[in-house]
Amino acid sequence: MKKLLLFLLLIFIIPEFYCQKLKGEFAFKLPEDKGYKLFLNKVEFSSSEEVDWIYRFDSGSSKRMEIGVIILKKEIGGWVDILTLTDYIDLNKSIIYGKLKDFEPGDYKIVLIQQVSGVNKTIDEVEIYLYSDEDVLD
């Protein structure tokens, strides 16, 4: 009976502990802001502004973990990759930093991915609208 319990512990509980889903939140900062701000609704900025963004993970990783960062732009045929890079998190670094600068007006998406067993898994994503200062407001 003890062997069965140990077996079940090894199969179900320990992998769950080590394979926890990474979670966190995006925040954004304009040059005039003193700190990063969370957005609960639609995220919009002027395309002429430089926007710093972060993704803060709820907890760091006990080992170095590579994180893929993909910025996509919505085009007529769908979402198109415009920037792809790699960053990492570990026990001492639980924040990914990025910048939106010199992008044309339009709809964008920041997607964070993690490779698990050779398959890309989406950690989180956020959609952003960059408007032109010349856009007519309704």
Image (cartoon, rainbow, N blue to C red):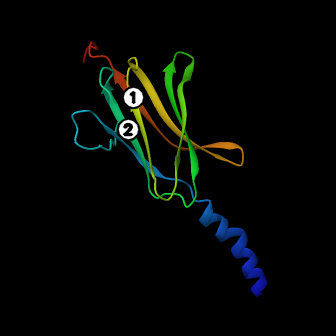
Give the x, y percent position of residue 21: 56, 55
Which image quarter is the C terminus in? Answer: top left
Give the x, y percent position of residue 19: 62, 59
Q: How far apart are marks 2 and 1 (CA)?
A: 8 Å
The mark total stands at 2
CA neighbours of label 2 inside 10 A, class few (<14), some (14 to 19), many (20+): some
Q: The residue under label 1 is which amino acid type? A: Leu
Instruction: Say which of 87 and 117 sits in front.
Output: 87
Task: Determine the residue positioned at 65% across, 70% down.
Answer: 13
Q: Name the residue under label 2.
A: 53
Q: What element carries label 1?
A: strand
Q: Is mark 2 on a helix, strand or loop?
A: strand
Task: Determine the residue positioned at 38% across, 18% down.
Answer: 105
Give the x, y percent position of residue 121: 62, 44
Instruction: Say which of 66 and 27 sits in front.
Output: 66
* Label number found at residue 86: none
Q: Going from the N terminus, do you reach mark 2 or mark 1 first? A: 2
Q: Mark 1 points at which residue?
A: 100
Task: Determine the residue positioned at 65% across, 69% down.
Answer: 14
Furthest residue in direction bottom, as rendered? 1
Classify residue 50 as left or right of residue 5.
Answer: left
Classify residue 88 as left or right of residue 95.
Answer: right
Instruction: Say which of 75 and 81 sits in front.
Output: 81
Which image quarter is the N terminus in? Answer: bottom right
Task: Determine the residue positioned at 71% across, 72% down.
Answer: 10
Q: The residue under label 2 is which amino acid type? A: Trp
With respect to residue 104, does 62 lie above or below? below
Residue 6 location, quadrant: bottom right
Give the x, y percent position of residue 115: 64, 45
Residue 107 location, quadrant: top left
